[in-house]
């Protein structure tokens, strides 16, 4: 595809990100939903050694949207920026939601990535995006969190009391 053919798509995407608002994010994930998600993350972490971080971004910064930054690239950057890689057992998991693009990506730290394949994470992302298409942001995210917690329980069961290394509440950007 020629660069000139990509321009209209890039412009549409950039405008979609430009016009996305915090109110859009709050409608998708109101305070009660955020509390339920934090509770699900905290309860799950009591049953395994993983650290789960949910980041919901209303839209990419316009410069990143215009530059064509992919959902995966943004998820990897946030994984690093928020220190999700820096957990005691190398078992951090980022669930990244980009509301403007209605896309989800999961990034797992090296300790987890060795045991759980990409297709499994993609299936969980599909659970979320299918729910989002129905307008069920909270339910789809809770279902995905249960799947993530089940995987972490199976591969990294709790082995006693440990510190909670990452905040449980969703980070709303």
Image (cartoon, grey):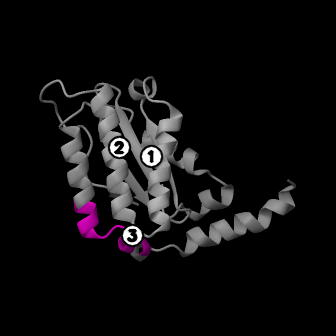
* Lower sequence index among marks 1 and 3: 3
Q: Quadrant of residue 49?
A: top left
SS of the residue under disc 3: helix
Which span of residues is magenta-colored?
24-35
Indicate yes or no whether the magenta region holds residue 56. Answer: no
Q: Is residue 143 visible?
A: yes
Q: Which residue is drawn at 57% across and 71% down?
A: 18
Q: Give the residue displayed 24% in from the left and 51% down from the top.
A: 40
Instruction: Kindly state the secondary structure of the residue where label 2 is placed.
Output: helix
Distance from label 1 to label 3 (Cα)? 19 Å
Residue that badge 1 annotates: 124
Q: Which of 20 and 102 is in front in this view?
A: 102
* Tag shown at residue 147: 2
Quadrant position of residue 115:
top left
Compared to residue 165, the image places residue 65 above or below, namely below
The label on residue 139 is none
State the image quarter where residue 47 is shown: top left
Residue assigned mark 3: 28
Residue at point 52%, 35% (across, down): 118
Marks 3 and 2, how far apart at CA: 21 Å
């Amino acid at each position: 595809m020629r660069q000139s053919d990509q321009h209209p798509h890039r412009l549409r995407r950039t405008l979609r990100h430009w016009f996305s608002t915090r109110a859009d994010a709050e409608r998708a994930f109101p305070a009660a939903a955020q509390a339920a998600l934090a509770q699900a993350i905290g309860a799950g972490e009591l049953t395994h050694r993983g650290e789960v971080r949910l980041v919901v971004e209303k839209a990419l910064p316009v410069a990143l949207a215009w530059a064509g930054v992919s959902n995966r690239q943004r998820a990897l950057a946030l994984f690093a920026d928020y220190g999700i890689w820096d957990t005691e057992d190398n078992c951090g998991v980022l669930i990244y939601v980009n509301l403007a693009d209605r896309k989800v990506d999961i990034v797992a730290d090296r300790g987890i990535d060795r045991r759980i394949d990409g297709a499994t994470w993609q299936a969980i992302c599909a659970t979320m995006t299918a729910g989002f298409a129905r307008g069920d942001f909270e339910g789809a995210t809770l279902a995905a969190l249960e799947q993530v917690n089940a995987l972490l329980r199976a591969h990294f069961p709790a082995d006693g009391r440990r510190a909670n290394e990452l905040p449980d509440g969703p980070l709303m950007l």
